[in-house]
Image: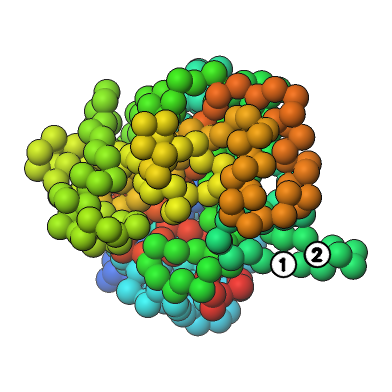
Amino acid sequence: MQRILSTELAAHPYEKVLVEGWVHRVRRLKAVTFLIVRDAAGLAQVVLDEPGELTEESVVSVVATVTPNAQAPNGVELTGPVVRVHSAVDVRLPFDLHRPALTASLPTQLDHAALALRHPARRAVLRISAAATAGFRKALEAQRFVEVQTPKIVGSATESGADVFELDYFGRPAYLAQSPQFYKQMMVGVFERVFEVGPVFRAENSDTARHLTQYTSLDAEMGFITDHRDVMATLTRTLAGMFTEITGRTGAETPQVPAEIPAVHFTEALRIAGAPADEPDLAPAHERALGEWARREHGSEFVYVTGYPMRKRPFYTHPDPARPSYSNGFDLLFRGLEIVTGGQRLHRHADYVAALSAAGEPISAYNGYLAAFRYGMPPHGGWAIGLERLVARLTGAANVREVTAFPRDPHRVAP
């Protein structure tokens, strides 16, 4: 007998079907016992005459007749069942999964991730992450981008000033990649437009609600641009496609992405946020103030901040030709939180040599990277979206760990 998912039962009234999944709950009433079975799609209600000794989270098969009942999940229930237990749970669960929300603390949930992630609310968030990733791919492929895969073990640090995880690579030092930046730039010389979905690693001892030491980065790079504004326009279209895909796949509400997201220069952003004019970067409080300003003045959940000081941007960032102390770089804030960093890159070999020398970096450590610019590279730029931050902001999660299946932070390397 072919297995039927819970959401498909309504299409098989009065038929005998096979349902398989986990015991979500056993509800014992005076006259009847209801067995709620959870599968990948949802919940199915089974009417039991003999309740037996079924325990929550045990894995079962149920052969029964689909009977319409408006009060049951999906408008049907299963009657006359034959239940087979594949894997019985004989330990006490650390928390209940049948309640609408998990009441266990976040550390407890993370310690028991294999169980906590089964909760419908946690599963729903992970489906949103999957839909966001699918939307990212779909939107970029429609704009002629090619997906690539790049190494996660590298010979030199990618971002100047950022902490890296060093490892022993057969007796010589190597590092976990902080981003695919160098490689995606090289691949612009191959395909002109490329993207990647993959993990990145940051050895920053930041134990905050917005930081992880390993997260998923949605990267893109594109050639033959005029400046960073071309990159911003492409990113805007990509975000619109991502949110459309999220809503279509999951039914989750997503905000409208304006055809043109409001943008402010860094110097103006400081004024709006009430920050001193000599601040080198935006603090979280400044980002929140800018988010409120964008909603109030533009009705937008998004705002670009452009022209960050060059001293706060990586060495490969292209300076603003009119104001060389500022960059052709940007951040995108979503609901008052930075979720994207991007900009125009340098594209001439001599400019890279000068930038690395000014930063005190050894040229020899970047020879493989710099070779690409000896062979001719077009003006180009790109961005990186932090998937967990995006999903946390979209779903209203207070902590990125709530939307990460197996988060890594300065204190957690398990499970």
The answer to whether any part of residue 105 appears in the image is: yes
161 or 105, which is in the foreground?
A: 161
Assign the N terminus to one quadrant of the image.
Answer: top right
Report the residue at 45% width, 37% height from top: 319
Please state the horizontal and vertical placement of residue 360, each as a whole percent of the image. Answer: 63, 57
Please state the horizontal and vertical placement of residue 367, each as a whole percent of the image. Answer: 78, 43
Proximity of marks 2 and 1: CB atoms separated by less than 8 Å? yes
Residue, disc 1: 166
Taking the image as shown, residue 301 lies to the left or right of residue 212, namely: left
Residue, disc 2: 173
Report the residue at 27% width, 71% height from top: 30
Report the residue at 82% width, 68% height from top: 168
- CA gap, disc 2 to disc 1? 7 Å
Please state the horizontal and vertical placement of residue 20, each as a whole percent of the image. Answer: 55, 50
Local crowd at mark 1 within 10 Å, few (<14), some, or many (≥20)? some
Q: Amino acid at mark 1?
A: Glu
| Sequence-first tag of 2 and 1 | 1
304 or 322, which is in the foreground?
A: 322
Taking the image as shown, residue 55 lies to the left or right of residue 277, namely: right
Figure quadrant of residue 399: bottom left
Q: Amino acid at mark 2?
A: Pro
In this view, the residue farthest toward the right is: 170
Figure quadrant of residue 223: top right
- Element type at marker 1? strand
Assign the C terminus to one quadrant of the image.
Answer: bottom right
Report the residue at 41% width, 34% height from top: 320
227 or 413, which is in the foreground?
A: 227
Its colouring scheme is: rainbow
